[in-house]
Image (cartoon, rainbow, N blue to C red):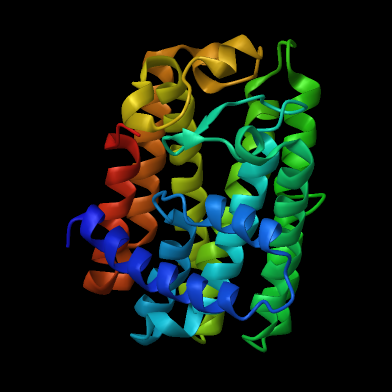
Amino acid sequence: MPAHAFLDRMAVKTNAALHRYVDTWEGAPHVLDEAIRYSLFAGGKRLRPALALGAAEIVSGDADIALPAACAIEMIHTSSLIHDDLPAMDNDELRRGKPTLHKVCGEALAILAGDALLTMAFDVLATAGHPRVIREVAQAAGVAGMMGGQAIDIKSEGKRITLDELRRIHACKTGALIRVSARSGALLAGADAPTLDALTAYAGYIGLAFQITDDILNVVGDAQAMGKSVGSDAANEKSTYPALLGLERSRALAAEAVDAALMVLDPLGPKADDFRALARFIVEREH
């Protein structure tokens, strides 16, 4: 199956489940509910849910068992985008082809919507009844994961850092949530240790390829195709792979990461073909 067909299939499952979960949140003020829905249903590839659902499907043949994790992780990811776009962070005005949330409803409500999504994600995740998954997702999103990586990234703006330091930033900021997406789906489906290790390694490699490609697209991408501003990394003096290594070496590193991702899938056979297509798509995409 082509990668876009796999992503579309998993996005349909994810979006339907997200609507079901949000519809159960009784007592939410209308203005907050609207803000949450504006960002949560603004589109996007739904890559992280696809990894959770796809991993569960590889392990057990049942993608739906991972829906609580898929939806919770997408809520956490959306929360991070809302906060990243704020003037205090990246100060972006466009996200997924639409004005960013703080441009629509103001900074205060955008902060509250992001906080609400982060909080309610764990309400959703708890319905899976798997404490290990809850802890792993919390750790991936927390001080040693996404938020820790973001903090280091902010403090690195305008500074010259090493390749190892850049890898650490992105392993936390982007890679941690991508890795835990695959791990959550695998754990909820009852993966054995070798399969869990293979899927974890795969997600680590494609997380690296994804971040490098994102950095490249911020330099050479088309804003209309991407649905967000380009050139913001340079404007904010952010540490990126192209800034440190140049475009040619960055592309080579992304290709190497994809090759490594494909290699670790070998023991899983044909049932991992969707993940193989997804790995290739990550470096070939234009948005």
- Which quadrant holds residue 59? bottom left
Examine the rendered structure and indicate whether residue 266 appears above or below residue 130: above
Q: Residue at x 78, y 31 (%)?
A: 152
Instruction: From the viewer's side, name the closer residue of 38 and 29.
Output: 29
**Percent x, y of residue 29:** 73, 65
Quadrant housing residue 235: top right
Please tell me which residue is depicted at 38% across the width and 70% down the height of the picture. 54
Above or below, 57 relative to 229: below
Residue at 35% across, 62% down: 265
Total marks in image: 0
Asked if residue 194 can be seen in this view, the reply is no
- Establish if 114 lies above or below 53: above
Please state, as top left, top right, bottom left or bottom right, where the C terminus lies in the image: top left
Residue 180 in the figure: left or right of residue 15: right
Along the line of sight, which residue is nearer the eye, 22 or 156?
Answer: 22
Q: Position of residue 80 (x, y in %)?
A: 66, 46
Residue at the extreme left = 1
In-image side of 190 versus 46 (left or right): right
**Residue 244 at x, y percent in the picture:** 57, 14
> Residue 122: where, in percent of width, then height?
72, 72
Name the one closer to the observer, 88 or 128.
Answer: 88
Q: Is residue 137 visible?
A: yes
Q: Quadrant of the N terminus?
A: bottom left
Q: Is residue 40 left or right of residue 122?
A: left
